[in-house]
Image: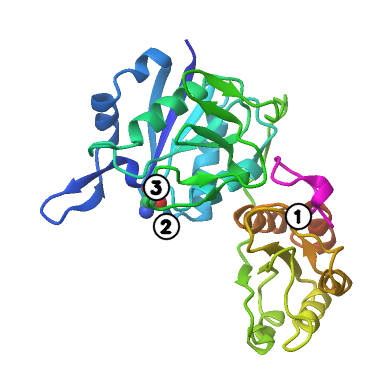
Amino acid sequence: MKNILLIHTGGTFGMMPAEPTKILAPADIQHLILKYLPETENIARIDFEVAFNIDSANIQIHHWRTLAGMILQNYKKYDGFVIIHGTDSMVYTASALSFMLQGLAKPVILTGSQRPLAVIRSDARSNLVNSIELATYNIPEVSIYFDKQLFRGNRAIKISSTSYEAFASPNFPVLAEVGLDITLAKNILPARKKLLYSDRFDENILCIRFFPGLLPAHLEAIAGSPVKGVVIEALGLGNLSIYEKSLIPWIENMSRAGKIIIITSQSPYGTVNFNLYECGQLITAAGGLSAGDMTSAASIIKLMFLLGQFPDNPQRVKTYYQKSLAGELTESDAGS
Ligand code: ASP
């Protein structure tokens, strides 16, 4: 029987309807799991740890350090890791862990639920039981399990806050489907012998959503600020205004000041492609970089991570940004 470490971090999963207000509050989760999911003991030998117990909107970089540190410390002792996490920021934590723990040889699966475990029609039970079973398989990457599907964590997006089908992976096939049988995909990352660990991030970045009418004047102050990089959520293939209220001079200014500009897309499906329109060519000439087919969350976390690795070397940040570090990017789409 395999050994699995189950780590709790909070979220809806372990909340109880607290009388009389009915506000969901963190409950005694280990007690709940044993009470509601006795069958988990037939799947694997499970140890349980509480890393922290918070609504995932409150996750900070130090929480990722705690989590990655727990996995690192227990790496030899366990065959797989399952993390119970709030759904709201799950894709950010999954992206962060995928960069912090590169070259995994064991599964790290995040899961959660739309309804608390102790509530009728909860999805918590099937999500956790299936995650624990999947953690006994050879899936050596950071993934998210939800509603019968296992996604690469840094490829996933949260698509619904009301449906059980809360996540999707628009630009990458699912890693596993859970039905009568468990079907594993062929595109799972290969296990590596050497785990590369880093917990350095630089949070001096911004993410800005482009919209028609955005005044470049409002962005000017960023060039003289401590901000080291900006992810711009642009339109379609990576377009933004280049005629009236053109953002190109601002991108040039930022690049000249040694700051990184990343262009991602508001369209979750597809990739940024700078080769098709005049805008893409102007952005490239101004020093902007394509996020290819990465999700917005992965684009943001990757920028924080790489700025943490190469604090004084924007050129290296740019070079590594266009490489796939943990399967987050289709490399043929990078730099396009
Ligand atoms: N607000 C909750 C959280 O992300 C939602 C959830 O768990 O699904 O912590």
Q: Residue at (80%, 51%) from the top-left corner?
A: 333
> Mark 3 is on which residue type?
Ser
**Mark 3 or mark 2: which is in front?**
3
Q: Residues within 10 Å of mark 1 (few under 14, many from 20)?
A: many
Can residue 188 be seen in this snapshot? Answer: yes
Element assignment for label 3: loop
Viewer-side label of 3, 1:
3
Counting residues from the N terminus, which is met first, the one under dot 3 or under dot 1?
A: 3
Residue 292 is tagged as 1
Q: How far apart, in angstroms, are the residues tagged by discs 1 and 2? A: 29 Å
**Nearer to us: label 1 or label 2:** 1
Q: CA distance from mark 3 to mark 1?
A: 29 Å
Closer-to-camera residue (272/154): 272
Residue 249 in which image quadrant? bottom right
Q: Taken as a whole, is the magenta stretch helix, strand or loop?
A: loop
Crowdedness near tag 3: few (<14), some (14–19) or many (≥20) residues, C-alpha within 10 Å: few
Which residue in the protein does label 3 denote? 163
Q: Which residue position holds label 2?
A: 58
In-front residue for pair 170/12: 170
Q: Secondary structure at mark 2?
A: helix
In the rendered structure, which segment of residues is drawn in magenta? 322-336
As shown in the figure, which amino acid type bears the numbered disc 2?
Asn
